[in-house]
Image: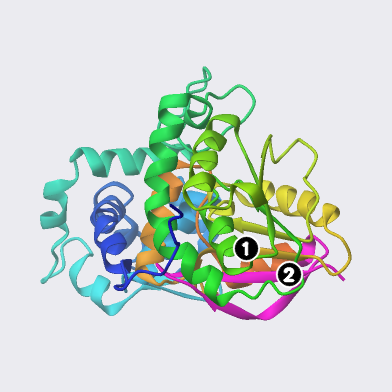
Amino acid sequence: MTIPLVPPITDPTAIFDLHRGHLATELMVGASAHFKVFDRLAQGAKDVTTLRAEIGLGERPALVLFTALKAMGLLVERQGRISLSELAREHLVSGGPFAVDDYLGLTADHAGVLATVECLRSNKPKGFAQDGGGAAYIYKDGMTSAMDQEASARRLTLALSGRAKNVAPVLAARVRLDGVDTLLDVGGGTGIYGMACLQRNLRLKLIVWDRPEVLKIAQEMADAYGVAERTTLVAGDMFKDAVPQADAMLVSNVLHDWDVPECHALLGRLSASLPQGGRLLIHDALLTDALDGPLPVALFSTMLFILTEGRNYSTAEYRAMLRTAGLTPLAEVIPTLVHCGVVEGIKP
């Protein structure tokens, strides 16, 4: 019996937002008690580079932290200079008549706060070790990846499928694939996003490209969703191996695992393999172009920072990446669920 991929009756976005809510506490307490961000800005605005240097953070961790604090309404950025909001000035500067920084400090030594602060300082994902120790969702030469080990790959891939089962049918319903013969699901995991598109487009063929252990689950999904005959599974390293040929490529919730150089490298490889008129679809949670929210996406970005070498990006950042890869971004962003949207580029 084929399982249909259909949109949920209710929107699960609030559940994901609640799940990530603890990160707001960890960032706010870390900024106050460990990095002294609010005290450092008490005398006036500072440019981003100066503030980064004072608190000892690299570019990526500082961007993650400042984006979240702006989204919380605690910092304001104008023309590259960061200042305190009125809320932060009255309540988070030490010694003020209405200051509550000592209250926040009661949780300064909690395990979650300390772990988040350490990740920000080291600019390394949780579980990373210089001796080749692993991290959950990423893989590189010399690093052990959970996605290359059968038990952990199955657990993590199936865990991520919970979000995909909700969001993929919405993506498939809203993204038109008329005229597309073959869709490549890059780093596709379970392949659910591409498989939802197969159920909506009966002439479409799908290639799911991912690590070998992950594709074992994708095969199970293809069988369950009744699309195995139109699905090809290709094992490989998306940063090294030949890109499977397709006239449209979907990169769903993949780029957020990687820093900017890796995003450029991957998109460049994909673009080079697209035919003229080919389409590249980036599907991800999107920050505002001002990098000041929304808060749920800023917190999700923090979670990604802790677990991977990436973060969330804005629509403007993705469009710039598409242009650098030789693609022409489309004006429309197609919303799906859980703060996600599709940013598309066409190969001229």
Q: Work out which residue is located at the far front of the displayed protein and give it.
A: 1
Is 275 displayed left or right of 61 in the figure?
right
The spot of residue 259 in percent (x, y) is: 59, 48
Residue drawn at point x = 31 percent, y = 70 percent: 72
What amino acid does circle 2 point to?
Gly
Q: Is residue 345 magenta?
A: yes
Q: Is residue 85 above or below residue 283?
A: below
Q: Position of residue 19 (x, y in %)?
A: 26, 56
Task: Please tell me which residue is depicted at 20% across the width and 74% down the height of the picture.
Answer: 90
Residue at the disc numbered 1: 282
Amino acid carrying label 1: it is Ile
- For mark 2, give the secondary structure: strand
Residue at which label 2 appears: 345
Which of disc 1 and disc 2 is earlier in sequence?
A: 1
Residue in the image at 60% along x and 61% along y? 198
> Which image quadrant is residue 282 in?
bottom right
113 displayed left or right of 37: left
Stretch of the chain drawn in magenta: 323-348
